[in-house]
């Protein structure tokens, strides 16, 4: 039996692009190739949040762009659904493939399931058990309506089993984000080049202990003036021991300005950069002494790179990065963060190991499985 229609592959926001790139490559390389249409919802739309990732990851131009742009969660999700429905009608896909946990993931999965189009969720089963995170809601709901679920770590399978999802739907295939890390590493840009291209003197990073990289964008960390102020103070203290490079999400940059917090940034020790491209971020992380972040993706990438990571959150949906990798949850507690930095600067940072199937071949395993699964339908 042949496959009935194209696989509609959905991307929307920054963390989707590095997950979908290896999947598209593997689908094209499969014998026979899987027919694919790439849909960009337009959830992220700035060059620095979207287009640059297409260039760095050699992603093909999207076949369809829904151009939804920003909005509240309700508006954004609703707009994506409204614009995606006619695409499903027109293309009659064999399935809709979604990655990760952003609003685009849930919105497109919902449209598909209501039209009896099978939903394939890549990076399924991760749980922070914190329902105040919008991504946790997206994860739970997407998994409930998915027909085939690919997981990155075995605990994700346990989470799905607890939610009543039959194990016959679940496949442990590894981590596609790490496929991109392995491929991108060869072409990653050095920290020096990244600073130079952003008109920053790279001498800032000539400290004998190296430099730290910071990203912050979770609403829980950056949307409240008092919380963001406290975090910037702690980062200022860390920067007295180790220069920091902050790659700022547009939300964080605009909140630092609107909450009048820019005085807390000591520019002699803290470099503020706009959102970086994939190859710039990879090079910056690979050369870093430590990464401080609230991003899910960076917790995984630092584990793959063997770079110590301090996660500025109380929980993680990616526990393997703590159990096996280089990640430590430090929350927002000043003394915990400063203590962890001291350990790392004393050469006692977590070394960790790279988890099972985070080996650069996850997309191939997913494609091989998906092909067989679609043929049987
Ligand atoms: C989204 C994801 C989050 C992911 C993050 C990575 C959801 C619920 N959240 O959060 O899981 O970690 O992307 O960046 O889907 N903005 C721009 N330019 C852009 C995109 C956004 O300026 O290209 C600004 C806008 O002011 C926008 C705000 O950032 O309103 C938030 O963007 P949004 O897509 O709503 O959520 P993120 O915080 O980026």
Image: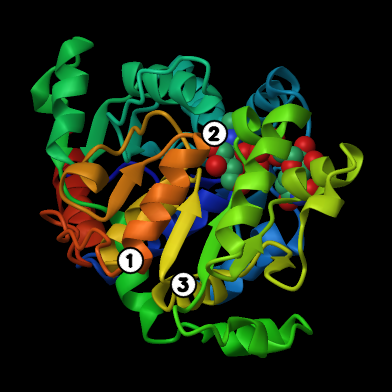
Which comes before the other along the chain, label 1 or label 3?
A: 3
Q: Which residue is drawn at 81% across and 45% down?
A: 256
Q: Say which of 19 and 297 sits in front.
A: 297
Residue 55, visible in the rendered structure: yes
Residue 341: image quadrant is bottom left
Q: Say which of 310 and 24 sits in front.
A: 310
The circle on residue 88 is 2
Q: Which residue is drawn at 65% across and 89% down?
A: 203
The circle on residue 369 is none
Secondary structure found at label 3: helix
User: Whole-percent x and y of residue 11?
Assistant: 54, 47
**Disc 2, ligand 1: is the CB inside 8 Å?**
no
- The quadrant in which the C terminus is found is top left
Marks 1, 3: nearer the viewer: 1
User: Whole-percent x and y of residue 92?
Assistant: 47, 36
Q: Mark 1 points at which residue?
A: 307
Residue 67, visible in the rendered structure: no
Secondary structure found at label 1: loop
Marks 3, 2: nearer the viewer: 3
Q: Distance of mark 3 from mark 2, alpha carbons?
A: 35 Å
User: Whole-percent x and y of residue 236?
Assistant: 66, 55
Alpha-carbon neighbours of circle 2 within 10 Å: few (<14), some, or many (≥20)?
A: some
The circle on residue 282 is 3
Q: Which residue is drawn at 50% across and 43% down?
A: 294
Q: Say which of 83 and 19 sits in front.
A: 19
Picture layout, residue 262 above or below residue 76: below
Residue 154: image quadrant is top left
User: Whole-percent x and y of residue 334?
Assistant: 52, 39
**Disc 3, ligand 1: is the CB inside 8 Å?**
no
- The quadrant in which the N terminus is found is top left
For ligand 1, give the image quadrant: top right
């Amino acid at each position: 039996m042949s496959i009935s229609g194209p696989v509609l592959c959905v991307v929307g926001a920054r963390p989707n692009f590095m997950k979908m790139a290896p999947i598209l490559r593997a689908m094209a390389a499969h014998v026979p190739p899987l027919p694919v249409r790439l849909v960009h919802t337009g959830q992220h739309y700035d060059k620095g949040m979207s287009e640059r990732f297409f260039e760095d990851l050699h992603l093909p131009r999207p076949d369809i762009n829904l151009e939804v742009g920003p909005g509240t969660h309700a508006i954004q999700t609703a707009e994506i659904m409204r614009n995606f429905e006619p695409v499903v009608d027109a293309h009659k896909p064999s399935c809709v493939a979604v990655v990760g946990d952003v609003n685009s993931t849930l919105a497109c999965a919902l449209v598909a399931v209501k039209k009896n189009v099978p939903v394939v969720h890549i990076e399924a089963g991760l749980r922070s058990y914190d329902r105040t995170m919008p991504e946790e809601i997206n994860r739970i709901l997407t998994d409930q309506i998915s027909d085939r679920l690919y997981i990155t770590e075995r605990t994700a399978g346990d989470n799905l089993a607890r939610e009543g999802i039959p194990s016959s739907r679940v496949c442990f295939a590894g981590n596609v984000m790490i496929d991109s890390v392995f491929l991108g590493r060869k072409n990653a840009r050095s920290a020096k080049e990244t600073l130079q291209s952003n008109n920053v003197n790279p001498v800032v990073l000539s400290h004998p202990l190296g430099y730290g990289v910071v990203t912050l964008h979770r609403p829980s960390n950056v949307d409240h003036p008092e919380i963001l102020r406290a975090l910037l103070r702690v980062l200022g203290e860390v920067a007295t021991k180790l220069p920091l490079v902050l790659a700022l999400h547009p939300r964080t940059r605009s909140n630092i300005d609107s909450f009048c917090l820019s005085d807390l940034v000591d520019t002699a020790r803290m470099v503020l950069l706009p959102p970086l491209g994939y190859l710039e971020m990879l090079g910056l992380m690979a050369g870093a002494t430590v990464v401080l972040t609230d991003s899910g993706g960076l917790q995984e990438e630092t584990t793959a790179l063997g770079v110590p990571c301090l996660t500025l959150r109380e929980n993680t949906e990616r526990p393997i990065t703590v159990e096996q990798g280089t990640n430590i949850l430090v929350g927002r507690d000043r003394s915990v963060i400063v203590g962890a930095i001291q350990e790392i600067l004393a050469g006692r940072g977590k070394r960790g190991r790279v988890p099972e199937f985070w080996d650069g071949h996850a997309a191939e395993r997913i494609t091989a499985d998906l092909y067989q699964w679609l043929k049987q339908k």
